[in-house]
Image (spheres, helix red, strand yellow):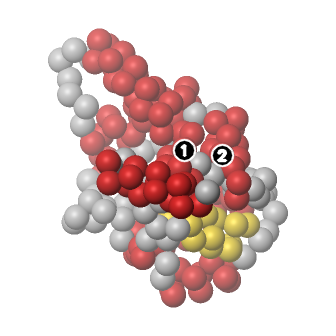
């Protein structure tokens, strides 16, 4: 990782790099060990804590599991590839984040007409967007809508599980008719 990029990252944030650009189990391990855990210790959070993760294989690794067990972090694996209904960030945070990003980027470009967004300017812009767009209420609403806190499986919008195609609609209608 270039030093200038690392210097541009706000205090308390972590950065990682993979050749593919995708999350790798080693990067997630380093995040939990060197960013997440120290941040919750500094915040004086009571242990044990529950860390919800996507059920993707990069988040479920024996080395990570052992680390979390030793640190009193309980990994709660959400069903993989169900982000639109089970992951709080997808359900409540990404829309205001996307809107905030577009707004701040337009402002930044007006303020810096001769510059492009680079790896060095990305993190400070994102920090500003996060501070203005995301708040505890949005985060809490995401957990509530996903039925995670308070626990409520009925809060999930299961209709989002159904594919949006004509053949699925026919199957749904037949199911309703057959159930009568």
| Quadrant including the N terminus | bottom left
The mark total stands at: 2
Residue 91: image tag: 1
| Quadrant including the C terminus | bottom right
Residue 169: image tag: none
Q: Residue at x 64, y 65 (%)?
A: 51
**Residue 59 visible to the viewer:** yes
Q: Residue at x 32, y 48 (%)?
A: 166
Q: Residue at x 44, y 71 (%)?
A: 56
Q: Residue at x 20, y 28 (%)?
A: 116
Q: Relative to the observer, which residue lies in front, 103 or 46?
A: 103
Taking 73 as reference, is 62 left or right?
Answer: left
- Write down the quadrant of residue 101 in the picture: top left
Name the residue that disc number 2 marks. 145
Q: Relative to the observer, which residue lies in front, 157 or 32?
A: 157
- Write down the quadrant of residue 9 in the picture: top left
Q: Relative to the observer, which residue lies in front, 52 or 152?
A: 152
Secondary-structure class at tag 1: helix
Dot 2 surroundings within 10 Å: few (below 14), some, or many (20 or more)?
many
Identify whether 96 is placed above or below 15: above
Q: x, y (%) of residue 154?
A: 71, 54
Q: Relative to the observer, which residue lies in front, 22 or 147?
A: 147
Q: CA distance from mark 2 to mark 1?
A: 7 Å
């Amino acid at each position: 990782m270039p030093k200038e990029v690392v210097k541009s990252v706000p205090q308390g944030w972590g950065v990682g790099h993979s050749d593919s650009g995708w999350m790798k189990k080693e990067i997630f391990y380093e995040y939990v060990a060197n960013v997440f855990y120290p941040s919750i210790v500094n915040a004086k959070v009571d242990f044990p804590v529950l860390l919800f993760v996507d059920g993707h294989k990069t988040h479920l690794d024996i080395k990570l599991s052992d680390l979390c067990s030793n640190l009193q972090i309980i990994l709660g694996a959400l069903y993989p590839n169900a982000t639109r209904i089970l992951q709080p960030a997808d359900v409540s945070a990404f829309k205001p984040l996307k809107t905030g990003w577009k707004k701040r980027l337009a402002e930044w470009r007006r303020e810096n007409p001769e510059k492009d967004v680079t790896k060095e300017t990305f993190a400070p812009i994102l920090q500003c967007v996060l501070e203005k767009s995301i708040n505890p209420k949005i985060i809490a609403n995401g957990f509530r809508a996903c039925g995670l806190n308070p626990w409520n499986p009925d809060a999930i919008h299961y209709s989002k599980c159904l594919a949006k195609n004509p053949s699925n609609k026919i199957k749904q209608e037949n199911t309703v008719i057959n159930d009568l």
